[in-house]
Amino acid sequence: MSVILGIESSCDETSAAICIEGNIASNMIANQTVHEKFGGVVPELASRAHQQNIIPTVEQAIKQAGIQKATIEAVAFTRGPGLLGSLLVGTSFAKSFALALGIPLIEVNHMQAHILAHFIDDAKPDFPFLCLTVSGGHTQIVLVKDYFKMEVIGQTMDDAAGEAFDKTAKILGLPYPGGPLIDRYAQSGNPLAYSFPEPQIPGLNFSFSGLKTAILYFIKQKVAEQPHFVSENLSDICASVQHRIVSILLNKLRKAVLQTGVNSIAIAGGVSANSGLRNALLEFGEKNNKQVFIPRFEYCTDNAAMIAIAGYFKFLARDFVGQDIAPLARWSI
Ligand code: KG4
Ligand code: ZN
């Protein structure tokens, strides 16, 4: 039997999960609300919060799974990419835990883990499949050939899709992280109320910085004419911005399907929780007779279940690392 402890601490979520024989038995997440008032994650505060949260979170995960600490057979941890101070907390914890129990240590790439979250539930994609990986720091189209054989065939040249959501929210005066709030307001708005430009980037790459600037100038101009423009039209603004971000993502995904001939499509990462993106992908799948895979909400944003499942596949391959391992702030998949 394989019992894996997964640890995630790459950004502002401290998470621990237990995976037993490839099934997730617990997935505990401690959110950090300390960043809200700063309008973004403050790295130093994130590291401190991880330090406070990590032991209770791991204890809860073990308790919730109904296992004894001594039965854990390996520790999988996020080695990167992410904030170095945050990664250091999870990495140091994982190393000490593995050393104390005399069990192997498994490094996991956070972006690969977002994709491998599709192997937690029963509806597992067959290889190869395309995965649009959209988070606060990344926007990539990945050709997934096997569990750890992945090729990035398109990516953002500037901001990530999650940043486009969060920066728009900031312009609108909404608290961090703004993505989920834009999603909520968008549900009662008209997506065609305002038209924002679609960047003309060749190939499968993305760009979101021009869109952000266009939104900023649009809002500035409207507020100059009508001081309460944002509060009076918040739902329509959010729906229109979301509509554009989703159409940028979907158009590139459509192109990637044509270019590769791969008919199985998945989404992953925090932005895959977005209802507009989920609905658009479902519609795309139905219209074009493609198989689509959309993760459960709890496995979209950062979580340790995805680290534990990635760790499980590496455990089966006996792919371990030594105590000299160090975190990597940048680490391509
Ligand atoms: O994967 P994740 O939890 O952390 C990173 O690895 O970055 O992604 C966080 C990002 C944030 O930008 C957040 O605003 C966005 O995902 N996000 C959403 C939604 N839920 C989370 N964006 C749009 N709609 C949502 N429902
Ligand atoms: Zn993430």
Image (spheres, rainbow, N blue to C red):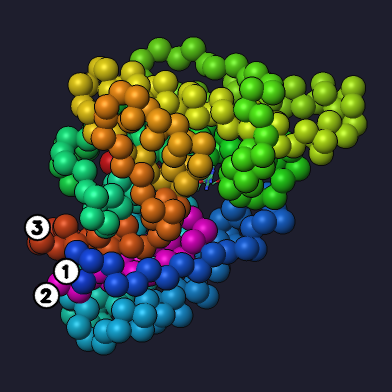
In the rendered image, the quadrant that contains the C terminus is: top left
Q: Is residue 333 above or below residue 203?
A: below
Q: CA distance from mark 3 to mark 2?
A: 14 Å
Select label 3 or label 2 by which is in front.
2
Determine if the magenta segment contains residue 63. no
Compared across the picture, whether 297 is left or right of 97 comes to right
Query: Which residue is disc 1 drawn over?
Result: 21
Number of marks:
3
Q: CA distance from mark 2 to mark 1?
A: 6 Å
Compared across the picture, whether 264 is left or right of 13 comes to left
The amino acid on which the numbered mark 1 sits, given as a three-letter code, is Glu
2 and 1 marks in contact (CB < 8 Å): yes
Instruction: Identify which residue is drawn at 30% across, 46% down.
Output: 115
Quadrant for residue 100, please give it. bottom left
Q: Earlier in the sequence, mark 3 or mark 2?
A: 2
What is the number of the mark on residue 1?
2
Q: Visible in this render: residue 61?
A: yes
Q: Secondary structure at mark 1?
A: loop
Q: Is residue 136 above or below residue 130?
A: below
What is the number of the mark on residue 244?
none
Give the magenta range. Answer: 1-19
Q: Earlier in the sequence, mark 1 or mark 3?
A: 1
What is the number of the mark on residue 317?
3
Instruction: Identify which residue is drawn at 63% across, 33% down.
Output: 239
Q: Secondary structure at mark 2?
A: loop
Compared across the picture, whether 229 is left or right of 79 comes to right
1 and 3 marks in contact (CB < 8 Å): no
Instruction: Identify which residue is drawn at 64% across, 58% down.
Output: 35
Magenta: main secondary structure: strand
